[in-house]
């Protein structure tokens, strides 16, 4: 009784379309199909199952990296562009005067206190030392709007901020 050689084992995987024979590639027969399309016979086809959660996770990851790089770059270019142009905008809180009215004495320099029995005492304001105004804390008395409060926004720069990754904006 002739003994036949054992058949080579077949490797199976849920990701591979057809089983792989564990025979050496030199022992494979060359058929007409193999000569025409060697790539399909030499490499197994791999199934990939991509669900919507995987696509969303990859998209969120790519968007996070892009935003993490894009936003600082955008603000850095805006700071550089702002430094190039002259800042002559008047300060918003003090209207360019460099001083603001004292809120305690309402600009009079004196504070009136009513004592018991209908008596009134008028004294100099301790907040502004009787001047009635204080140095503007926004512009530090210069009357010029600080860069971080620069209100020179154009429609184009606002759209550039909104569509930063979709349109190429150069100021």
Image (cartoon, rainbow, N blue to C red):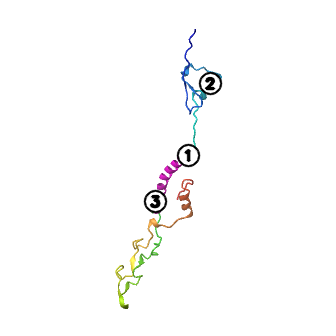
The dot on residue 80 is 3
Identified at 46% across, 57% down, the residue is 76
Label 3 vs label 1, nearer the camera: 1
Locate residue 24, reporting x and y percent.
Answer: 53, 21
Identified at 55% across, 64% down, the residue is 154
Residue 21 included in the magenta stretch of the image: no
Locate residue 41, reporting x and y percent.
Answer: 60, 27
SS state under label 1: helix
**Counting residues from the N terminus, which is met first, the one under dot 3 or under dot 2?**
2
- The magenta segment: 55-82
**Counting residues from the N terminus, which is met first, the one under dot 3 or under dot 1?**
1
Residue in front for this viewpoint, 31 or 56 = 56
Of the 4 image quadrants, the one containing the N terminus is top right
CA–CA distance between discs 3 and 1?
A: 40 Å
Q: For the view shown, which residue lies furthest in the top direction?
A: 1
Q: For the view shown, which residue lies furthest in the bottom direction?
A: 118
SS state under label 2: helix
Judging by the rendered image, the residue that carries numbered circle 1 is 53
Identified at 57% across, 63% down, the residue is 155
Locate residue 109, reporting x and y percent.
Answer: 38, 83
């Amino acid at each position: 009784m002739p003994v036949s050689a054992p058949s080579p084992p077949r490797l199976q995987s849920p990701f591979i379309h057809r089983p792989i024979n564990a025979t050496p590639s030199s022992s494979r027969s060359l058929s007409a199909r193999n000569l025409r399309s060697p790539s399909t016979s030499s490499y197994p086809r791999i199934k990939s199952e991509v669900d919507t959660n995987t696509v969303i996770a990859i998209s969120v990851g790519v968007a996070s990296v892009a935003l993490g790089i894009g936003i600082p770059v955008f603000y850095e270019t805006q700071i550089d562009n702002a430094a190039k142009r002259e800042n002559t905008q008047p300060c918003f809180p003090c209207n360019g005067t460099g001083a603001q009215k004292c809120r305690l004495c309402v600009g009079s320099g004196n504070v009136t206190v009513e004592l018991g029995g209908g008596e009134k005492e008028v004294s100099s304001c301790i907040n502004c030392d009787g001047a009635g105004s204080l140095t503007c804390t926004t512009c530090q008395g210069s009357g010029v709007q600080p860069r971080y409060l620069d209100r020179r926004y154009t429609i184009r720069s606002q759209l550039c901020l909104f569509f930063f990754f979709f349109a190429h904006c150069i100021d």
